[in-house]
Image (cartoon, grey):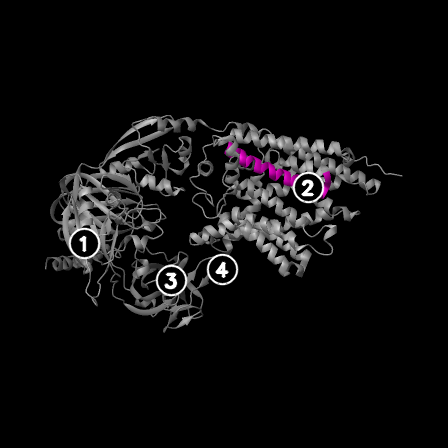
Amino acid sequence: MERRDCGWSGILTRRGVAVAASALVLGACLVMRVLGAKWYALHGNPDYAVVVLMVRHMLAGVDFPVFFYGQPYMGSLEPAFSALLGLFLGPTPFAVCLGTGLMAFAMVVAVHRLAWRIGGPVAAVAASALCLVGPDGYFHYMASPRGGYALGLLLTTLLLHEAVFFGAEEGDAPGVKARRFLPLGLLVGLSFWNFWLTMPAVGVVCVMLLWRLRLRLFRPSVLACGLLGFFAGSLPWWVWNARHGWQSLGATGASPGVRQSIETAVRLFTERLPALFESPGAPGGTWLGLGVLLVLLALALAAAFPRSGGAASLPLRRLLCACFLFLGAFTAAYALSSFGAINSRRYLLPFVPVFATLAGSGIGVLARAATAPRKTAIGLRAAAGVGILCVVFEVAGRMPDLQHHRRVKTGWHDSARTLASKPELPKEFLADFMHYGVNWATDEEVCAVSPKLYRYAPYFERLENADNPGVLENFRGFDHFLLNTGARSDFIRLPGYRVHFNATPPPFAFGVLPSAGIASMTDSSGRDWKAELTDCNGETIAPLPPAAADPACELTIAFKEPVAVCGLRVIGRARHAMESWGVEGRTDAGGAWRELSGMYRETGYYWSGDRFYYAGIAHRSQKVFPETQVLELRVKMPLHPSCPGVSFETVQILTAAGPRAAFDLAAAARRIQDAGITRVFADRWHARELHRLSGGALWTSRQTVETERNALETVRVPREANVAVVVEDALAAVTHEAFREAGAAAETFSVGGLTVFRLVPETSGAEEKADLMFYSGMLHADRVPALPKTAFAAKASFFGGGLVLRGISDFRRLDAAGSRVAIELAWEVEPGFLFPNNLAVFVHGLDESGRIVCQVDEGLSPDLNPYHERLGTAFSSVHKLSVPAAAEQKPVRLELGLLELGFLPRRAKPDTDLEVDDRRVVLPVSFSDAAPAQARDDLKRKGEKRKGSENAAVDR
């Protein structure tokens, strides 16, 4: 007698009803994806704008990118699918979003298929329903493209399917045919190329297959088919990286340490996953919604381990095993990589289809209770009913979110098109990356990009070659740049945008006051930095400390006699750059200070020739004010309380050099070529124009996309006959001084307002005194700086001799009580050694028993010259120790070491003749050797004495 099933499964046993229910849910999912594409078609997100441009460039045949623009790790398969749709629907934003929406719908179909195979039609319908709307971030990223998130979820689901069923079906008992590994390898290859967040799922597949197939997995035929499929799927990745220096291998960073990884893993479960699934619009709020999801998870666990009929739940147990493996693998990858450092829900989206499949399959297995005893079957079916009610509650609770998605702001699109309709506005703009959508909204008629995040290389070139670009929304404080430099620009307000355009430089030229006219340049402690700030050596810097009573740095510049000045030009170091600065002046040493230039932000902008630029190799800071007669200038730079100070490399005093004259760059280009010069180093605007006017025949130090990657080749001036340095006539004297300090010779001629220095090759065997480097708009004679004389010899080398401790330059008490001491260490960086970014120095004070009684642990991150580091350099580091009172009365041994920070921090091994204790160098000093503290007046008098001897030497 045939047994009838009257449970939940019985309702959908008939094929027609099951198909109808599935079609209804899948149809609703398709409608949601199409509606999402419609709602987000005019979304203003900049990453979405990048995808729109990628699709349009593919359709126009302009470009066929392998990766998301500006990144070497997210593949372009999803945008390529949108481009395929664009062949039929046109290059519209809706077609771009629809490509992502259809990819997301394919993911739902994959979830439906996997759940059906595990738990039947009830499981398929429930799992698909959970993907109908989903969490807020899920719906958003399944409608608004970001490069590959919908594809990533599809690949994750397909990999999960293979983990559950590959090699586990009845026909696979004798063994899996090798050719079946070909599509599996293809799937893994596509995942490797397109979306690295699928790697946890790839790991799950590998573990499940290894457990299921064991040594059969390593048969040559199996490996051959699997690898063939993998390389076929990831072929674009290999081809692109072989041509671009394998940039993908360093595309994502690692966790800084074990503690940070553990904290990230804890936050994943306590904060970020609950935030992913939160549903504030649901009845009862987020906590009730999370409770419903926990009930669904509990039902899946109960269904996987029934009291009887375990064979029917075997696929669910395999799925549960795969899900737990996925959770562990994802947690490890998330915590150990840089993905965990960013609190973004998009990185957690793979959990949505995984959870939906598990929850739906659990409900389906519970509903298929036909083989269970009657009482048990009733309980299981009741549990399935609870699960279905939970699914209905979850889906209904997500429906109010649709109103939020429908109200996507699209007014920016019309505002962007207004930029293109104004004939007085330029077509190129510096703007924050958030305004990247302007490019596609205006069909690329307007180019609005950030020079630091341009994404698409031709946009950088277009911005670089613009004659006078505009600035959108006061990007990086452009108005403060105008106030700092005395420049002007036009300004208008459009709906949605504030626009600066038609910027003009100051109407006069600037000369540089000779260093002989400067008496001193002292910081707030009284230390004189004139030698470091006025020489042509870019390796010497002045680390200005904050004042004792005020979190601000000061630099007081005293002249030998009153002089007319009109500004300052400063070359700083990016690691310790100033945030804002103001300039005051006075006409006598005891007089009152008066403001010459207000306290304005340091913006990163600067003038080069007739154009302003932002950042880059030519960057410098400049203050311009009305010409005034002063005896002293004071530069004030407020600091954040956590900032240790400001580092300057060069400070130039600007003087008025008459009205600004026009440059005849065409004549200069002809004369330079006639002289047989083929390689020119010049300021940013001059280099660009000389390259353009010569038709590309002249190599110039212009800013290009590759400049940052090849900085040393761009700034280092070879001493060859076909090489020239070109500067404005007003900077000729400073450039002559740089050649003199470097011991280099050059032939000079002037043309078109520019002075050309043609290098004279050195005779064979001649020793070069310095490296000629051209950056920040001027020539430098860089050489290893002469550090202060070593007071205590303590030589030790680290990293195979790449970093060398020369000794202790200074060891002094900072207060009369002697409770705080400062130790200054002298270091050398050997040529070819790249200073690591994760290095820390520690000094331990140990008593006779070996117990640490005082210590200092600080990052060793000196302000090295980024263009000279590979050529070798030297620097000092100062570290302050707080000495407990008990340590003053007992012998304390000081030991120094270097710590390489990272996931597993380790001490660097020293190579030294000194005593070594646990990779710590025992320093030949004790607290009794520390010099007594000096009052600030004593330091100032000492600085004035040294300053007087330096001035006498200069006069001689």
Does residue 250 appear left or right of residue 326 in this picture? left
Do the CB atoms of the residues marked 2 and 1 lie less than 8 Å apart? no
Magenta span contains residue 117: yes
Do the CB atoms of the residues marked 2 and 3 lie less than 8 Å apart? no
Q: Which one is closest to the eye, mark 3 or mark 4?
A: 4
Task: For marks 2 and 1, give the CA distance.
Answer: 75 Å
Do the CB atoms of the residues marked 1 and 3 lie less than 8 Å apart? no
Q: Nearer the viewer, residue 199 or 492?
A: 199
Q: Nearer the viewer, residue 481 or 99?
A: 99
- Compared with 319, 481 (above or below) is above
Tag 1 residue: 758
Q: Which one is closest to the eye, mark 1 or mark 4?
A: 1
Q: Which residues are magenta?
A: 95-120
Q: Which mark is residue 904?
A: 4
Task: For marks 2 and 3, give the CA distance.
Answer: 70 Å
- Secondary structure mostly seen in the magenta stretch: helix
Tag 2 residue: 115
Q: Which mark sits nearer the N-terminus, 1 or 4?
A: 1
Residue 59 visible, this angle: yes
Task: For marks 1 and 3, give the CA distance.
Answer: 64 Å
